[in-house]
Amino acid sequence: MPPIYTELRLCSAAASALPDHALEKEVIRFARIPPDLLVRLANRPLVLGRQVATPMRETAHFFELAERLERPPLIMTMPKDRFTPAVNGWKRGLAKLALETRHNIRYATVVDFQKADNRSFCDIRCIDGTPFLQLHGELLVSALGPRAVQAAIDATGFFRGESGLERYQRFFSLFTCFGVLAESYVFAGSESRLLEEAVLPAFEHTIKRFGRSPVIARLLPEGEESDPRWDRYPACVLPRALCAAGRPVAAAKLARLC
């Protein structure tokens, strides 16, 4: 199998090939791209696929990479996906936020895990009553500015109702002609099964069907993909996270110190 990542210099907007309208037409048909998503893809963005748009360090790094590649950032979200913290550590980190402070890491648990387990993200509320997705939108603005929220799109219509393999086949087809995917795959541990059963077969399928590899930029530095720092939040969102966790007194004390 060919390397899954494209050299970063070839992922820049300046390195983009001239439009292949026949290929684009076939990808639109095969991938069944919803109209609102197609409008965003027309700008040939750098794409991050995550269930929730949230300002973890990984997301900040994604925006820096988009600027470096001179591509508009686009985060394809899945708000109707389910919160399954027992089997997905990344999802667990959305509800038990690891927050960087000057001297250590502080945690804020913003939902009742028992009540939220297996519910759709869009149906979950934080301990203080704030809708879960609204909270993460507020954190995005606080940490990265309004552009971060504007970069996100609800891609439920694209991802809905298919197996992992079929979903990846359609997803990877986008990056033969409609921009670049930013991702880091970990070929070990709990992700191995997904990679073997869906990601790698879909990658090969894309090459066979379209005659091109999907363009995938390595998101995180090689060898650092599993470093927990990428799932941490900046200290600037700590007061809001504490409020969402039902700890307004602690948040007020922290605000006075800032």
Image: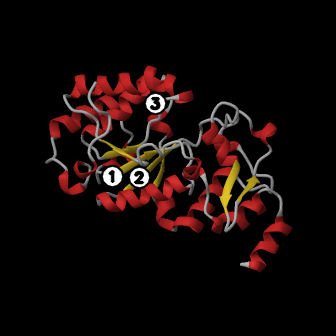
Q: Nearer the viewer, residue 107 or 145?
A: 107
* Marking on residue 114: none
| 3D distance between C-alphas at marks 3 and 1 | 26 Å
Q: Amino acid at mark 1?
A: Pro
As helix, strand or loop, the secondary structure at mark 1 comes to loop
Give the quarter of the figure containing the C terminus: bottom right
* Marking on residue 187: 3
Vertical position of residue 16 compared to residue 241: above or below? above
Q: Amino acid at mark 3?
A: Phe
Relative side of 44 to 88, left or right:
left
Q: Amino acid at mark 2?
A: Leu
The answer to whether the residue labelled 3 contacts the one labelled 1, judged by CB atoms less than 8 Å apart, is no
Q: Residue at x 48, y 22 (%)?
A: 163
- At which x and y percent is residue 107? 74, 54
- At which x and y percent is residue 8? 28, 49
Q: Residue at x 55, y 28 (%)?
A: 189
**Which numbered disc, 3 or 1, marks the residue that appears first in the sequence?**
1
The answer to which image quadrant residue 185 occupies is: top left
The answer to whether the residue labelled 2 contacts the one labelled 1, judged by CB atoms less than 8 Å apart, is yes
**Which numbered disc, 2 or 1, marks the residue that appears first in the sequence?**
1
* Marking on residue 45: 1
* Marking on residue 74: 2
